[in-house]
Image (tube, rainbow, N blue to C red):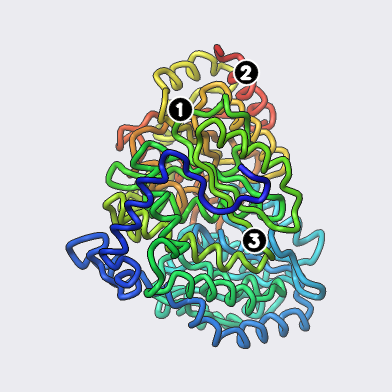
Amino acid sequence: MSERSDGLRLGGYAGAVEERLRRWQDERFGERLWARDHTLWSREPVPELTDRLGWLELPAAMAGEVETLERFAREAAEEGIRQAVVLGMGGSSLAPEVYARTFGAASGYPELEVLDSTHPGAVQDLAARLDATSDVERSLFLVSSKSGTTTETLSFFRFFWERAAALGDPGRHFAAITDPGTPLEKMARERGFRAVFNAQPDVGGRYSALTPFGLVPAALLGADVRALLGSGWAMAEACAPNASAAANPGLLLGAALGELALAGRDKVTFVTSPSLASFPAWLEQLIAESTGKTGLGIVPVAGEPLGDPGVYGADRFFVAILLEEDDAGDIEERLAALERDGHPVAVFRLGRKADLGAEMFRWEVAVAAAGAVLGLNPFDQPDVQLAKELATRAMKERGQGNAAVSSGGEVKAEALDGAMEDWLAGVGPGSYLGLHAYLPPRPATDEALSRLQALLRDRTRCATTLGHGPRFLHSTGQLHKGGPDTGRFLQIVDEPADDLPVPEAGYTFATLIRAQADGDRAALLQRGRRVLRVQLGQDAPAGLAALIGAVERLPS
């Protein structure tokens, strides 16, 4: 691989991809995609196929909204808002986090962060930061939910609404982003929110980065929203109906994703240059929730440190997303070694950060096309509701004083050796491990979890994914339950030392996150997945250290 090679380098898999593109050219796939032809994925015109393709026009459609977004952001900055907080989950939170971490706040504009953890420690961490830095008086909360009924989002809202109410006129500290006519829109207008932004109802959550769900937070940062949409528009034109399949960037990548998955290369492993480190978290949801169903699926691997060829099996497809201004020399060398070892590799290079808009559009087309290769509907999520229902049941049982569902099957971190060996027994080629951390996202915790992820990968040669709960339930959770039965799941929980009540709700954040862990575990077991729950206790750092020690003691 040359130092500057971009695009797809598929080795022996190139022939299958070329054949798929020839077939799509004959079938007019690109033209039919833009015509919203549901028969690309299903003989029946199911609702998710007839009303979820509005993302195709977003780069052009949202261009007319740029002045409104910029004016809203400018007015907030001029009024002294210094901290913007997205209260959301999944499609409502992932793109804003990418924008916040990639662009940062422009001079004079507020910092932006995302709250998508119901752990009381995470909520308290944010509340403490607001008290110590900008205070609620200078904060703006974006209550973001497509349905307007998301339990986590409304719980966050109630907590911070109570704090803002003590200041008087709390509504001016809140804006809502939701579909038209939702309960959230009704509540926002009743409570006098400073703004309500309606998103396009024909765009699903994981395709919503270029809707108000992503662009309102981006505008608040002072990011160049016009350039972001412009790059998306350029990619949309490259993927236009009249583009040949072989020259269509989205279809080319989609054919590769699909054909490599059919050939067993279904673990798409991301590596990025430093400025784009948060982007794979957005790609995770897009890929996992779109393709992980009916026993099929592509497993996105984000955050796993890039290793030497010897730690990987023959199920990987390595994708590098690099920013021109970043130093990526070491990455290029490692990718070259992986390619020499027979792994397919793709390299996509962004000339500027605003080109994220183009890259998002490329991957949206690609994942939709890969769904056609696999013979599934990329726009539904049939297994997500199960975990929600079981979490609701767990909440009721805990409210009635029955904690049996929570405590059953737990293993203390300090007594884990035998259980860990049993959990890993039989893993082999094609397996993957999923780490589900129902812990507050903190730098030291994330560093320990990243180390655990790398250790498990090195010991087992299995792809290893990592997600914070309940965040991943709105992202990769569909894949875990509906995708191929090749995953083993390690659920990591703790006992929060302090709890926080959710105002107006009758429950606490500790109760909520534990019920979500219970519901997810029950859903996985119901689907026949192998799950090991580890209880860290009240000293989570010590528990994580014990867990890492247990992995280090595993037989090589």
- Picture coordinates of residue 7, whole percent (x, y): 54, 53
| Residue 400, visible in the rendered structure | no
The residue that disc 2 covers is 552
Task: Give the distance between the C-alpha atoms of the residues marked 2 and 3, in whole angstroms.
Answer: 38 Å
Q: Nearer the viewer, residue 517 or 476?
A: 476
Q: Where is 378 relative to 208, above or below?
A: above
Which three-letter amino acid code belongs to the residue tagged 1? Leu
Residue carrying label 1: 532
Type of the residue with mark 3: Leu
Quick check: marks 1 and 3 in contact, CB under 8 Å? no
Rounded to the nearest angstrom, the CA distance separating label 1 from label 2 is 17 Å
Point out which mark residue 350 bears: 3
Label 1 vs 2, first from the N-terminus = 1
What residue is at 58 percent from the left and 34 percent from the top?
Answer: 338
**In the depicted structure, whether residue 462 falls above or below residue 64:** above
Q: Is residue 496 above or below residue 502?
A: above
Q: Residues within 10 Å of mark 1 (few under 14, many from 20)?
A: many
